[in-house]
Each structure stands twice: as C-alpha cells, then as structure tokens.
Image: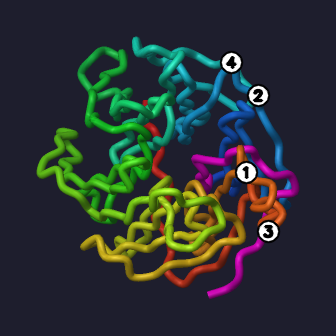
Amino acid sequence: MNEWRAVTRIPDVLGESPFWHPIERALYWIDIPARQLRRMDPGGIAESWEMPSEPGCIAPVETGGLMIALRDGVYFAAGWGGTLETVVRFNYDTSTTRFNDGKADPEGRFWAGTIYEPKDARKAELYSVDLRPENGNEGRPVVQLKAQNATTANGLAWSADARTVYWADTPSHAVYAWDWDPATNAMRHHRVFHQFAPKPSGWKPGQPGYGGRPDGAAVDSQGNYWCSLFEGQRLARLSPQGDVVAEIELPARCPTMPCFGGKDLRTLYVTTAREKRPADELETFPLSGHVFAMDVDVPGLPVNFVRT
C-alpha cells in the first residue's frame, strides 16, 4: 500500500461528503463551516461554490446536477453554480439542528441525517427522500424517517450486496446496521455493527489511549466498511461481520470521510478537518484540512446517483 498524498492546495476548515464523479472524472466534496461546495478536475484544479447555509452532504443526480442537503432542507441544482431549487424543507429547529452526513442509496433515493448541535440530547434523525418517477406520488418527494435517537448522524453506507444499511452516531462511538430491502426501503433487525472504545475521561488531543470516534464511511467491492475515526488519526477497515481487519494512519488527527475514486476506483480519498484544533496539533499535522489520497488494491463501490 502506498503513502498518503495531499491532493488539495488549500485546506478546508471541515471537509466532508466526498464522492468521485465517474462521468466528469472529478472529485466533489464540501467544507461545512465555510459553506462551500468544492470539486477538483483530473488536473488538480479545484473550484468552490458558496452556499447560503452550511452544506451537510451532496450527491450526484442521474440526469445531471447535484442534490444538496443544507441546514434547513434538501435542494437540487441542475448544474455547478446553478439555481438552488427547493426539494423539501424540514420543520426541525434550524437554530440547533442541521443536515450532516448523507448520500444516495443503490436504488436512487437520497438519504441525509441531521446533527443536534448542542449535543446534550439524542435528537438527530435519518431521512430518505424518494424522487424517483415510480415512487407513486406524482413527482412530489416521498420523505421517510428511517432512524433516530442519535446526536450526530454519520457513517451512512450500504453493503456491497445492497442488503445492509449502516449508520453511525458519532458521540456514542457506535456504528449500527439494519437489514435493508432495496425495493420497499424497509429496515429491520437493528443491531450494533461495531462499538468503538469511548474517549477516556480527561483525555486531551495528542495524548495516547484514544482511537477516535466514527465519522463518515465508504464500502469497498469486498464488502469492507471503511470508517473515518475523528481524533483517531486513522481509518478503520471493518469486515462485513464488523471486525476491525486493518487500520491506516493519516497525516491528520481528524479524518472525516473516505470515498473511492479514479478510473478503476482504486484511489482512496479522505477529507479531514482543522476546525478548532489545538495549535500544537496543527503544528504537528500542518496538512490538517486537506484532502488526501492513497492507492489501494481492493476497489471501492461506485457512487450511487440520485434518480429523479
């Protein structure tokens, strides 16, 4: 396995939600607190698009454009820099809650989870938004509440056989799994897929004894679940049974989300954060906030497109 390389020239405050667009051969991602969507072409030239509020996640649309979850709801843009069209707004309190991690499922529904920013109650939820022509609702979005009782929605992914959905609650250090029916969108048999060790009492950044908490995730073609461990300076690769089978250190303390890209899906990308990190940490990890890439042997799964 090769070494990590930084592929961006300017760091993000909090990079998230990367995906590889196979048609454009471009990497997309977001910087949440900077309210920016970003994309980078094969030549390494990146461009940014300012949003009216914090983007939580993005996904490509099959007919072109992007589905974007902002603080108050889900929006569609027909092209880069285009007009944001409201898909659905949500009635939660936007002073305390915003959208966070999300992506499209293998059937083309758009999923997004929320974060409850005070983090003193388990009020985060996970929604699916179905815009497919065959959803039977005359073109209007079908919104379903899929999971709740969390604080920070993260780690959304589907197994290689599209029969299991994964979702993490970051402060709980837990990744959950459900059996999933692609046709009906039903979730059953809720269980803990993997429980990471909690943060030790009194732990400070830079001290030993803490492996981080689960953030964004991706699945490879063998069904392994690759999980970013925020403050853990590593990615963990979990087997389909939920066992840690490998760990890969990063040149940043706070990785946020991996994705697979490149023409053969054998380039592993990961976004990272530098927001509110201690000065000595940023001195030790000066590339914090950059997007990193590494060549891997096992390809990932291609990005799912939203169908409308």
Of all residues, the one furthest to the bottom in this rendering is 1
The front one of 109 and 188 is 188
Rendered position, 270 above or below 304: below
- Drawn side of residue 257 relative to residue 9, left or right: left
Badge 3 element: helix
Rendered position, 307 above or below 70: below
> Residue 66, percent across and down?
59, 34
Q: What residue is shown with label 1?
A: 274
> Residue 274, percent across and down?
73, 51
> Residue 39, percent across and down?
74, 46
Colouring used for the render:
rainbow
Rendered position, 157 above or below 116: below
- Which of pointers 3 and 4 lies earlier in the amino acid sequence? 4
Q: Amino acid at mark 1?
A: Arg
| Disc number for residue 125 | none
Residues at circles 1 and 4 in contact by the CB criterion of under 8 Å: no
Q: What residue is shown with label 2?
A: 50
The residue sitting at 17% across, 50% down in the picture is 190
